[in-house]
Image (cartoon, helix red, strand yellow):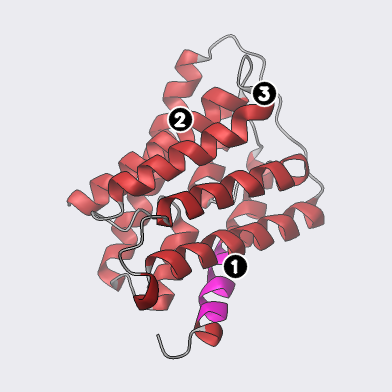
């Protein structure tokens, strides 16, 4: 139960910071820095409890990697989505009256960039948090947070820089994205997680 609670809490704070920094008046160009920083902090806070996935695509990759029990996957994903939804509702209350314009990404560029950077994120998680040779390292949270920050800066103008199905649901509830575009993130993010697990196995066959 504590692992499920941690997943919900970590995702909650991630989506909360996304909404509060992106919806005006927000953090402007510093939003990706704030988002990457809160993710890093929550990864350090919850890594020893749940593995600190905070992302259904990461949970999928870690499960395929063999480092997350199948029985834990549904609870993790439900908690992540619930945390994202709760954060979205709270952001909506705090930011009531703000003008929110839903992004209108071009489908194929958004689909591809979301897949690529979700792949990068999931691969980094697998490489720094599940490998025997990197066990006990002190940089795993930093590596994960910086990956999200870099991806948000690089892909923000193309797709919004989501890389996380739970975040996609959260920003849809906030009005930052439309229901009609939700499938882009769900498909690309989950596919990125699967491909990251496959690539990890090819690169680390003995781990």
In the rendered image, which residue does mark 2 sit on?
16
Q: Is residue 95 visible?
A: yes
Please, what is the dominant secondary structure of the magenta stretch?
helix
In front: mark 1 or mark 2?
2
Helix, strand or loop at label 2? It is helix
Q: Residue at x 68, y 62 (%)?
A: 116
Helix, strand or loop at label 1? It is helix
Q: Residue at x 58, y 9 (%)?
A: 97
Q: Nearer the viewer, residue 107 or 195?
A: 195
The x, y position of residue 88, in whole percent, is 47, 30
Query: Image check: 18 left or right of 206?
Result: right
Q: Residue at x 41, y 77 (%)?
A: 65
Per the rendered image, the range of residues in magenta is 190-200
Q: Give whichever of discs 2 and 3 has the lower sequence position.
A: 2
> Within the magenta stretch, is there residue 29?
no
Check the image and name the residue furthest to the bottom: 206
Residue 40's place in the image compared with 17, above or below, is below
In the rendered image, which residue does mark 1 sit on?
191
In the rendered image, which residue does mark 3 sit on?
28
Residue 177's place in the image compared with 148, above or below, is above
The x, y position of residue 130, in whole percent, is 37, 70
Helix, strand or loop at label 3? It is helix
């Amino acid at each position: 139960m504590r692992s499920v609670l941690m997943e919900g809490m970590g995702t909650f704070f991630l989506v909360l910071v996304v909404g509060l920094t992106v919806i005006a008046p927000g953090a402007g160009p510093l939003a990706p820095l704030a988002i990457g920083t809160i993710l890093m902090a929550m990864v350090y806070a919850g890594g020893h409890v749940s593995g600190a996935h905070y992302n259904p695509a990461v949970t999928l990759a870690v499960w395929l990697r063999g480092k997350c029990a199948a029985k834990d996957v549904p609870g993790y994903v439900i908690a992540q989505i619930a945390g994202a939804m709760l954060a979205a509702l709270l952001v909506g209350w705090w930011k009531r009256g703000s003008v929110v314009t839903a992004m209108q990404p071009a489908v194929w560029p958004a689909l591809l960039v979301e897949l690529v950077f979700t792949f990068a994120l999931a691969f980094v998680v697998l490489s720094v948090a599940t490998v025997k040779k990197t066990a006990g390292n002190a940089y795993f949270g930093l590596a994960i947070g910086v990956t999200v920050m870099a991806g948000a800066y690089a892909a923000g103008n193309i797709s919004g820089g989501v890389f996380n199905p739970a975040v996609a649901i959260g920003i849809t509830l906030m009005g930052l994205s439309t229901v009609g575009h939700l499938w882009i993130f769900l498909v690309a993010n989950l596919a990125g997680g699967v491909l990251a697990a496959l690539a990890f196995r090819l690169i680390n066959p003995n781990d």
